[in-house]
Image (tube, helix red, strand yellow):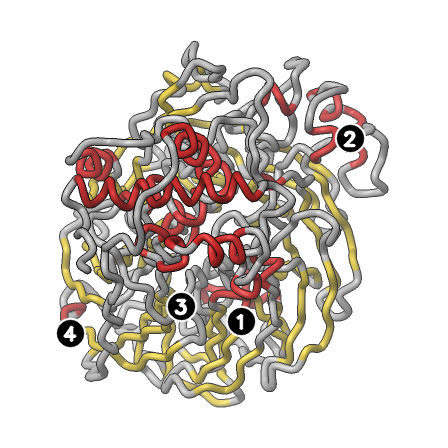
Amino acid sequence: MSLKISGMIAVLACGLVACSEEAPHTNLTLATVNSEHIANAAATPEAWLSYGGGYEEQRFSRLEQINQQNVHELGVAWTYDLQTSRGVEATPIVVDGKMFVTGAWSIVYALDAKSGEEMWVHNPQVSGEDAAIGCCDVVNRGVAVHEGKVIASIFDGRLQALDAQTGEVLWSVLTVDKSKPYTITGAPRVVKDKVLIGNGGAEFGVRGYVSAYDVHTGELAWRFYTTSNPNKQPDGAASDGIFAAKANDTWGDTGKWTSDGGGGTVWDSIIYDTSNDNVIFGVGNGSPWNATLRDPEGVGDNFFLSSIVAVDADTGAYKWHFQTTPRDQWDYTATQTLILADLPLGEAGQARRVVMQAPKNGFYYVLDAKTGEFISGKNFVPITWASGLDPQGRPIEHPDARYTEKEFLGVPGPMGAHNWHPMAFSPQTGLAYIPAQQVPQLYQSLPEGQSAKSKWNLGADYAAGIPPTYPAGTLDVIRASYTGTLLAWDPVKQQERWRVEHKGPGNGGILATASGLVIQGTLRGNFTAYNAETGDKLWAQSVNSGIAAAPSTYAIDGEQYVAVATGWGGGWALNNGQGWDEAVAPDIGRVVVFKLGGTGAIPDPMENFVVKQPKGETFGTADQISVGFQLYAESCMVCHGPLVISSGVLPDLRWSYQTADAETWHEIVMEGLLSDSGMTPFDKVLTNEDAQNIRAYVMDQAWLAVANGDAQAPTK
C-alpha cells in the first residue's frame, strides 16, 4: 500500500498497518489536512487527526507494528516537559510528523513527533480569576487541526486559530458571556468548514449551548442551546424551533433555573456522523443539581439535560435526542465519550449504524445513529439509583433516589460510573473498553431555609456523608469503597467480557489497536498494554506521574510510536485526596512517547517534601469547629479535598504554615493574596469570622490525623 505524504511516496509494509486494498492515496500535510481526511482517518493511520482519532471517535488504530508478540520491547523514544504541574487531559494530535498537545492553563505545544524537539509554544495567559470559576482544575483536552491551522479552546472562553508552523494567532473569538462563570475544557472539533465547541460552568449557574464557528474567520455560524430561555422566548438560535415545539414545555415557569440558566453545558463529547450528516453531542447536568430547587413545579423532564442530541451539521437544526437521565438530580452528565459504530444487530447479523455511550449514570446505551431510537441499555456497574431501564430506555428510579433532607446513598456518585476519561471501541473484537469506577456519594438536600455559603450552585448539602471527626481506620474503609476498573463490554449482548481491577479509581483514557492491544494509564502512573480479547497484561511501565489522558499512536519513517500526556490533576485529584493511601507529589506535566527498542529514560519523580505535621495548635470552640466544618465543605472541599486531605495537586492545608497563622490565612482567603494561582478572595461569600472558623476546623483535622496515627506530632 502506498501513501503519498508531503509529496513523497512512503511504502508501508503490512506489518506496520492493517492493509486495505480500498485505502486511497492521500496528500496529507499540515497545509492540506481537512474534514475529508478526518472522515477517512482509517486511510492515514500514521497520523492521529482528531481528539478521538476520527469522526467516529473509536480510538482504534489500524497500526499494528507494535503487537502482542513484541509489545514487551517498548521503550521510551523521547519525553518533553510541559511548563506546568497541574492536570493534563489532552490527547496528542499528530499530522505530517508534527505533534500538537495542550497542558494545564490551555497552553499549546507544537513538537517534532519523531524527536520531541520543540517547534513553538503558545501561552494564552489564562488568569487566576478565570481559573477560580472552574470546577475541575485548569485542564484542557486538546486541539483540532485544519488546513495549516491549529484550533485551540481556551479555559477562559476564547476559541483561537493558530498558525500550525509558527503558533501565531490567526483569529480569536470569545465564545461566552464573560459576566457569567463559563469555562472551556473540552477539545474543539472541525466538521466541514466549521469549528464546534461547547463550554462548562453548570455547577456555578450558567445556560449551556454548543456553537459552530467558521474555521477560516472565526465568525459564528450557528448555536444550539440545551436549556430553555428563562423567559421561553426565541434566542435567534438554531434551537428555537424545537424549544417552541417541545422542549419549553418540559420546564416550569419558576425556580432557580430562570435566573441561573438551568445548566446543561456541552463540556466534552462532540462527534460527527458522516452517514447522516449529523453532529451529535452530549449534554451535562442541571443547575442546581437539586431539581426541586431548579424547577420546583416538577412537571417535566427538563430537556435537554443529561441527553444525547443530534443536529444538522450545516445549520444546527434539531434532528433527535435521547435523555439518559430525565430531570437529572445527581450530576449524571451525558457528556462522556460518544462512539459511532456499525454493529451486527439485524436478524441475520446485518450491520446497523449506532451511537454508543457509557455516561455517568452507570448504564451503557446503544442508539440508532440516524433516529436516536433506543436499541438497548444495561448497567455496566452496580448502581443504586435505578433498577433498570424500561422498553423506551427510561430509567426505573429507586423510590428514594430523589433525595430530600433524607439522605440517599448514590452509586454512582457525582464522579460517575465513567467520567470524561475516553473509552475506546475495537471493530475487530466488537468490544468497548470503559474506564469504569465506583465512587459512592451521600446525597441530601440542604435543610429548609438554609442556603450554602458557596460559589457553587448545587442545592445540596455539601457535607452530607462527611464526618467532622472519625476514628482510626476510617480512611481505610473509605479507600476500600473506591474502585477503578478497565472493563471490556460487549455492546451487542450488553454484557461484560472481562475486567482488570485497579488499585483505587484512577483510570486513564484508552487506546485500542488492530494488533489486539488495549493500552491505558492510571493516576498512579502505570502505563499498561493488555490483550484486547482476554485482558491479560502484556507490558507495563511506570511513567513517574499520574495519567488521566488517553494515548494516541502514529507512525513516522516506518516506525510506530505510542504517545501519552501525563500530569497529576483534574477533578478527581483535587476533590478526592482521601481516596488514596499515599500522597502523590505534584510533578511537571510531560509528554512521554514509546517505540519498539526505545532506549530513553523518564525523569525521576519529584520527591514529596511535605511533612505531615501540624504547624500550629488547635483552637476554637466545638461550635466554631462545627460551623467551620460546614463552611469548609461548601467553599473549600472541591479543591482541597474532603476531610481536608489533599492528593498533592494543591497544598494540604493541614500541614501548611499559612493555616497556622491567622493573619496570613486572612490575606489568602479574604484578600486574595494567591489570586494569580486561582485562589481568589472569598470576601463576597464569607465573613472574617467564617474564615477563621474554617481555619479552626482545618487545624482540628490536622490534630485528628495525629491522634489517629496518620501524622506526626510537631517537635519543639
Instruction: Report the residue marked by disc 4.
Output: 73
On screen, residue 220 above or below 3: above
In the rendered structure, which disc, 1 or 2, sits on the residue that comes first in sequence? 1
Q: Is 183 located above or below residue 253 in the figure? A: below
Residue identified by numbered label 3 = 85
For the C terminus, the quadrant is bottom left
Q: Identify which residue, 330 or 244, lies in the foreground.
A: 330
User: 418 or 446, which is in the foreground?
Assistant: 446
Q: Callout 1 environment at 10 Å: few (<14), some (14 to 19), or many (20+)?
A: many
- Disc on the earlier residue, 4 or 1: 4
Q: Nearer the viewer, mark 2 or mark 3?
A: 3
Marks 3 & 4, CB-CB < 8 Å contact: no
Disc 3 to disc 1: CB gap under 8 Å: no
Whether residue 342 is visible, yes or no, is: no
Which residue corresponds to the image point at 23% horizontal and 83% vertical from the top-left? 600
As measured in the structure, the alpha-carbon distance from the residue carrying label 3 to the one carrying label 4 is: 30 Å
The extreme top residue here reads: 399
x and y percentages locating residue 138 in the rendered image:
51, 59
Circle 2: residue type:
Pro
Q: Earlier in the sequence, mark 3 or mark 1?
A: 3
Q: Residue at x 48, y 50 (%)?
A: 136
Check disc 2 and report the residue beneath it: 230
Q: CA distance from mark 2 to mark 3?
A: 40 Å
Residue 203, percent across and down? 57, 39
Judge whether residue 379 can be spotted in this image: yes
- In space, the residues marked 3 and 1 are separated at their CA atoms by 12 Å
Q: Which residue is mark 1?
A: 107
Q: Amino acid at mark 3?
A: Ser
Q: Which of these two is toward me, 18 or 412? A: 412
Q: CA distance from mark 1 to mark 2?
A: 35 Å
Which amino acid type is marked by label 1? Answer: Ile
- Closer to us: mark 4 or mark 1? 1
